[in-house]
Image (cartoon, rainbow, N blue to C red):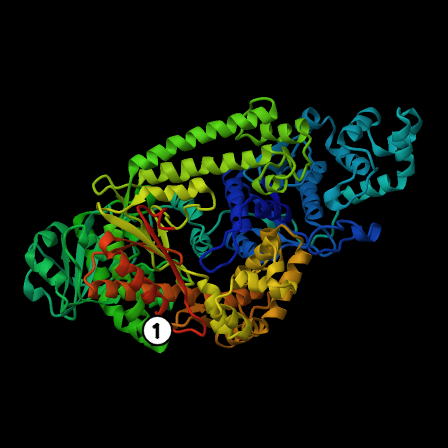
């Protein structure tokens, strides 16, 4: 068998992944974009290369043996953003889960580790593949060593063999170091010879073969200026070649035997993927998994019934309504489980829904029901004309409150955490993904019966844990009543004017065509606007715009690059507009049209109530919280969301700066409290304090910067994050943050105190005792500890704001019922509630909606609600 060695340049790939992908974080708030990009690349490499030996090499630190030669080596590089730094230990944990060796060596770079091992593997007859984003490693290329260099971020790679280098670059692998000696390398701060670029350096090497030979034949070089530069910078050129040369004999304490790779443990990798929230990668793994082995379970006695009888119910039952599809609005119910103190039953769904006894029991408020997921159960039954009442315990929500960092709240996972073996995981019975199917009736009946039995048996323990955590009222008085309201909202749905959406699609298409035409006129030619390879030369060669960033394949035309060039040429704003309009057309217009329910003419989004660690709701299928509203065309999409009846209006109510008001309350900061009580514009007020100016002297830019700091503080923003938001240097961003804390010292004190509290008890809480556990708050690892500290600071703020709007929804729902109004809550979008109501209820809504929302909780500062109304969601903003 051919021995195959893969060597990965860890630092290079994770850096490229970080800057290629938008900042992402999992439900715990851990940044994951770089690790996700790296892992995507890694899984592709494992599949395509099938290595027998594998190693990921990392740089050991800032100082290397090269600094003894040139102190300024790699000088001028910006400090690694903390959002990336904290991902290095996460990546190494993931590599450990994969069983992949990773290594670093003090005073040496990853390149030297890779160079030493690749040379050894070459001599031992291996096929060697080096993976990097850095062309410095091309000097390692031989007949047996291929260097794969990333392009287009990390999504594609270019394989460099000796032949490919001759064809593409006109030089041999060994000449890479001569090339660097002549032209230098700005990314590593290698000086080279000023004025000598790649073209000139390549020409000299084709003629004279090496740097040394260039200087032997210096008199033969044409061009007086070039000859002078070469002569003047001879020492720099020699030193630059030395700096660029990879050490192929680094003193490694590992050998080939340490890099042996067989395969990874799917269970270990799945666990870390779940923790990181890598659902798409989990799905890829699942596709290749073998059928799981069956487990030995405790015995269970249950009865399958073909008729529902009243004596089956004792007054307190666990009810399991089983659906396989994630989108339960469309999913069939495959069976129903009932368990109580005495018996366990399986009821086929067609038997239950035709039974008057079952329907009467389900709707009876006096019959206590322990359910798996009250919102899902409620919607499933509402879709069949049954209104569920009498729910006294929600198993999913209880598990979520007790284990907010867990991604899996299935009965199987809950049983596993309780060390009970009475039920299998759903995937062990139904399979996963495309392989998912309903098993034979006897297996289905037993699985559903076991789930209902487990729910009944585990409920007392979950209830006790909630009581111990002072979270019983959080479940019973907040989350469970809210689940019923969300169920009604999902079932009701929101009406969509498909004709208007389709018309918008046509208008957007026309706008796209017009913008495209304007761009072509400004460029002086037509080209593929969606191709960076075609766009780059137009902007940076033909129109001579300043080059901000280059990629391995040419010029970067990424959004952040174009945003920096907006003032340079009128073509740039039009390109950005073209991209925004294109996304609106494909993701939102076409996307929304696909999910309009044919029967109701409505969109029935689903709310995730047991997902985020802060307690915020999210929505899917579709995600109505993410419709872009910064662009007018994006805002106009909301015109398609209309009342369901004639003579009705849409009504929107939005909390004003709720998180900043919560911060003012929690920190008890006098200046912040005073600003809100006096109803000052908080961003202007902050700008006045931070910049030491009068109100009339606050410019729009000052207010924008103050706003970014105000909201950034709530999210534990770093100087890097703020610098990206404001387009300023990290040094300037740090000054803003420091001035903010000087202005609001009690905010700083709160942040210090909450971190101390978190270190003592291991978690932080919201107003309503929602917990977020921070196991890494006392970690010796600086990056892990720093992240946990930031989380400790912002979770009580975000989580309390989430609790407040949830309570407001309950209060408002009860008030609408009490007033016997027809108005209905339709949507919750972040801090905003959207209702529909008859026009004759408008005056009443104006009165009771702000009243309910503003008086939900008493803070040191007033809560403020702004409302609007109209014939569509757009008009109600």
Q: Can residue 820 be seen in this snapshot?
A: yes
**Of 190 and 875, which appears nearest the observer?**
875
Residue ID at (30%, 46%): 871
Q: Secondary structure at mark 1?
A: loop
Q: Is residue 774 visible?
A: no
Residue 767 placement: quadrant: bottom left
Which residue is labeled 1 in the image?
Answer: 471
Give the residue furthest to the front.
696
Q: Position of residue 528 (x, y in %)?
A: 53, 26
Among all residues in the image, which is located at the extreme right? 219
Q: In this view of the protein, which residue sits in the foreground, 446 or 822?
A: 822
Q: Nearer the viewer, residue 697 or 633?
A: 697
The reply, left or right, for residue 433 in relation to residue 92 is: left
Where 147 falls versus 740 (above or below)? Answer: above
Give the quadrant of residue 465: bottom left
Horizontal and vertical percent position of residue 621: 33, 46
Classify mark 1: residues with Cα within 10 Å, few (<14), some (14-19) or many (20+).
many
Q: Residue at x 47, y 30 (%)?
A: 512
Q: Quadrant of the N terminus?
A: top right
125, 414: nearer the viewer:
414
356 vs 390, left or right, is: left
- Left or right of 732: which side holds 41? left
Point out residue 269 in the picture as x, y percentages from the top left corner. Answer: 46, 53
Q: What residue is rendered at 45% in x and 71% in y?
A: 861
């Amino acid at each position: 068998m051919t021995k195959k060695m893969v060597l990965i340049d860890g630092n290079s790939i994770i850096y490229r992944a970080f800057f290629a992908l938008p900042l992402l974080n999992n439900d715990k708030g851990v940044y994951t974009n770089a690790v996700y990009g790296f892992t995507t690349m890694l899984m592709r490499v494992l599949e395509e290369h099938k290595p027998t030996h594998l190693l990921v090499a990392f740089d050991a630190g800032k100082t290397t043996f090269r600094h003894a030669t040139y102190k300024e080596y790699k000088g001028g590089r910006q400090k690694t953003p903390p959002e990336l730094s904290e991902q290095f230990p996460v990546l190494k944990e993931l590599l450990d889960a994969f069983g992949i060796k990773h290594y670093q060596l003090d005073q040496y770079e990853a390149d030297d580790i890779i160079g030493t091992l690749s040379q050894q593997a070459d001599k031992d007859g291996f096929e060697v593949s080096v993976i990097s984003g850095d062309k410095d490693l091309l000097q390692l290329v031989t007949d047996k060593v291929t260097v794969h260099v990333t392009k287009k971020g990390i999504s594609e790679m270019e394989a460099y063999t000796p032949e490919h280098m001759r064809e593409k670059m006109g030089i041999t692998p060994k000449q890479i170091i001569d090339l660097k000696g002549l032209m230098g390398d700005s990314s590593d701060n290698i000086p080279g010879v000023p004025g000598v670029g790649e073209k000139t350096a390549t020409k000299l090497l084709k003629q004279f073969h090496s740097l040394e030979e260039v200087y032997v034949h210096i008199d033969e070089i044409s061009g007086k200026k070039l000859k002078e530069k070469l002569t003047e910078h001879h020492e720099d050129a020699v030193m630059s070649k030395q700096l660029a040369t990879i050490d192929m004999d680094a003193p490694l304490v590992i050998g080939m035997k340490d890099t042996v790779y067989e395969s990874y443990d799917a269970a270990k990798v799945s666990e870390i993927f779940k923790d990181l929230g890598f659902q798409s990668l989990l799905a890829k793994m699942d596709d290749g998994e073998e059928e799981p082995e069956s487990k030995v379970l405790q015995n269970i006695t249950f009865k399958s019934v073909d008729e529902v009888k009243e004596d089956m119910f004792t007054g307190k039952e666990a009810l399991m309504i089983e659906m396989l599809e994630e989108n339960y609005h469309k999913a069939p119910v495959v069976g129903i489980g009932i368990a109580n103190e005495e018996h366990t039953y399986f009821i086929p769904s067609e038997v239950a829904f035709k039974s008057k006894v079952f329907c009467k029991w389900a709707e009876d408020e006096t019959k206590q029901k322990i359910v798996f997921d009250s919102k899902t159960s409620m919607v499933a039954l509402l879709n069949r004309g049954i209104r569920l009442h009498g729910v006294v315990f929600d198993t999913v929500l209880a598990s979520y409150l007790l284990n907010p960092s867990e991604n899996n709240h299935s009965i199987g996972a809950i049983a596993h955490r309780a060390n009970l073996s009475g039920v299998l995981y759903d995937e062990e019975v139904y399979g996963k993904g495309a392989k998912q199917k309903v098993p034979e009736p006897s297996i289905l009946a037993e699985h559903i019966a076991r789930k209902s039995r487990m729910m009944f048996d585990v409920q007392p323990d979950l209830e006790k844990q909630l009581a111990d955590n002072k979270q019983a009222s959080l479940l019973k008085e907040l989350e469970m009543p809210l689940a019923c309201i969300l169920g009604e909202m999902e079932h009701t749905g929101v009406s969509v004017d498909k004709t208007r959406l389709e018309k918008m699609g046509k208008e957007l298409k026309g706008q796209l065509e017009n913008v495209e035409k304007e761009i072509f006129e400004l460029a002086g030619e037509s080209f593929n606007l969606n191709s960076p390879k075609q766009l780059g030369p137009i902007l940076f060669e033909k129109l001579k715009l300043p080059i901000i960033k280059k990629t391995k394949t040419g010029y970067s035309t990424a959004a952040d690059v174009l945003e920096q060039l907006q003032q340079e040429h009128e073509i740039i704003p039009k390109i950005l507009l073209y991209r925004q309009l294109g996304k609106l057309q494909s993701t939102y217009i076409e996307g929304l049209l696909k999910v309009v329910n044919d029967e109701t003419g409505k969109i029935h989004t689903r709310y995730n109530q047991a997902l985020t660690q802060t307690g915020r709701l999210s929505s899917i299928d579709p995600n109505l919280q993410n419709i872009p509203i910064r662009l007018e065309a994006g805002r106009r999409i909301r015109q398609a969301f209309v009342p369901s009846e004639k003579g009705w209006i849409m009504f929107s109510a939005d909390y004003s700066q709720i998180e900043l008001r919560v911060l003012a309350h929690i920190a008890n900061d006098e200046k912040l409290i005073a600003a809100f009580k006096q109803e000052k514009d908080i961003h202007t007020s902050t700008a006045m304090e931070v910049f030491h100016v009068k109100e009339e002297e606050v410019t729009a830019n000052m207010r924008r910067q103050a706003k970014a700091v105000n909201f950034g503080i709530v999210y534990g923003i770093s100087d890097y994050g703020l610098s990206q938001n404001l387009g300023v240097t990290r040094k300037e961003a740090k000054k803003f943050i420091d001035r903010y804390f000087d202005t609001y010292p009690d905010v700083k004190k709160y942040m210090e105190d909450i971190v101390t509290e978190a270190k003592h008890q291991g978690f932080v809480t919201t107003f309503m005792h929602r917990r977020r556990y921070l196991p890494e708050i006392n970690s010796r690892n600086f990056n892990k500890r720093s992240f946990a500290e930031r989380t400790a600071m912002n979770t009580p703020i975000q989580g309390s704001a989430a609790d407040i709007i949830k309570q407001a929804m309950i209060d408002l729902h009860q008030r609408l019922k009490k007033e016997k109004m027809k108005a209905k809550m339709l949507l919750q979008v972040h801090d905003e509630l959207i209702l529909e109501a008859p026009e004759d209820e408008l005056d009443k809504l104006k009165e009771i909606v702000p009243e309910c929302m503003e008086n939900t909780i008493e803070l040191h500062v007033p809560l403020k609600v702004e409302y609007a109304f109209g014939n569509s969601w757009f008009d109600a903003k």
